[in-house]
Amino acid sequence: MIIVMKSDSPSAEIERVSSELRRWNITPEKLEGKHKVVIGLVGDTTEIDMRQIQNLSSFIEQVLRVKKPFKRASLEFRYGEPSEIVVPTPNGPVTFGQNHSLVLVAGPCSVENEEMIVETAQRVKAAGAQFLRGGAYKPRTSPYAFQGHGESALKLLAQARVVTGLGIITEVMDTSDMDKVASIADVVQIGARNMQNFSLLKKVGATGKPVLLKRGLAATIEDWLMSAEYILAAGNPNVILCERGIRTFDKQYTRNTLDISAIPVLRTLTHLPIMIDPSHATGFSEFVPTMAMAAIAAGADSLMIEVHPNPAKALSDGPQSLTIEAFEQLMLDLAPLGKFFGRWATNDNATTTPKFATLVSSSANF
Ligand code: PEP
Ligand code: MN
């Protein structure tokens, strides 16, 4: 349930309503949006009489029940206002969100050695990326496949961060590695295979670090949003959703199927920012540029692209990795499209007015 306060509500009145609710044994959560203050009530609110709440204050504009099972992740919970996730990086804050420029994330599947990670970081930065991605702990189908260099790879990521100032995105697979990963990552990735690892979700929720939550291989949109809800419920509001392809029946020509429709669907359901990973979605580097363009056209807030200086020799995910030169070319090709939609950063990560804003807000249904 949410209580929408009128825009001129004095803060003392908001506080008074909140303390009244606490006396009723309900835990209110104040959410300050750009235009409105919303008080979220989570938990079993079935017995609560909405009129009784409405009568608490003349500054209450509306009381709404959130019918979806995901509460904090729902669009209603922020009264239709998209979340802005501001990630501090050495180069300055980068904002993920619907009213901001596209955030570009690039780098190898795995951190292999110092030279390759630092070189890749420098070159993707020069081409326009704001974040370096790279795995230290790798979820591999085969126990005999390269599992990642672990802690030493984290140190190399930290080094690449110092050299380039790029933010770092890397995956955590095990709760016992959380502190190590969170100490160097600017955004902690939960991989597709761990999307429903609930202890991991609770733990990453407790860190407060921004989280990139990849969609599970066979997860429905609701499963995915319920996993986001675990992180939000643990007190961490900074969740970015990443669509990375779902498993369908073709394994020969594509690795997964990019669910591009997830973008407009999620826009009607959640306020959380959306990233698209066309690399894992297609599995082949030659299809990555087309799907990156489709993602921009469909309104994605961020792109994650695997880039390797020598994909033929990559220790993981070589076939889907772009060479550095191909990534540079891709950035040149994406720029006109990004600019057309008002989502391409000039020098900063300044707020823009995306052409999709009107379309999206008109489809949000309260
Ligand atoms: C990755 O980002 O390298 C990765 C393993 O992704 P996913 O969890 O989407 O397979
Ligand atoms: Mn990979």
Image (cartoon, grey):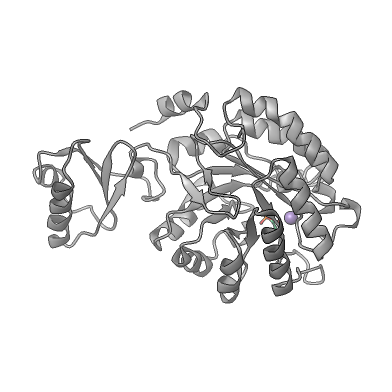
Q: Is residue 107 left or right of residue 193?
A: right
Q: Is residue 182 left or right of residue 33?
A: right
**Image quadrant for the C terminus?**
top left
Residue 191 locus on image (x, y percent):
63, 58
Going by the picture, which residue comes out furthest to the bottom? Answer: 176
Question: Is residue 229 positioned above or below 261 on the image?
Answer: below
Q: Residue at x 37, y 36 (%)?
A: 80
Question: Is residue 360 positioned above or below 236 on the image?
Answer: above
Q: Is residue 147 left or right of residue 50?
A: right
Q: Residue at x 55, y 65 (%)?
A: 197
Q: Residue at x 83, y 39 (%)?
A: 326
Residue 304 locus on image (x, y percent):
67, 46
Residue 60 locus on image (x, y percent):
16, 40
Q: Residue 162: name its quadrant.
A: bottom right
Q: Which of the two residues, 332 or 249, is positioned nearer the viewer here?
A: 332
Q: Does residue 57 appear in this view?
A: yes
Question: Is residue 352 positioned above or below 45 on the image?
Answer: above
Going by the picture, which residue comes out furthest to the right? Answer: 312
Q: Which of the two residues, 240 or 128, is positioned nearer the viewer here?
A: 128
Q: Is residue 23 left or right of residue 76?
A: left
| Quadrant of ligand 2 in image | bottom right
Residue 159 locus on image (x, y percent):
71, 64
Count of labels in the image: 0
Q: Does residue 1 appear in this view?
A: no
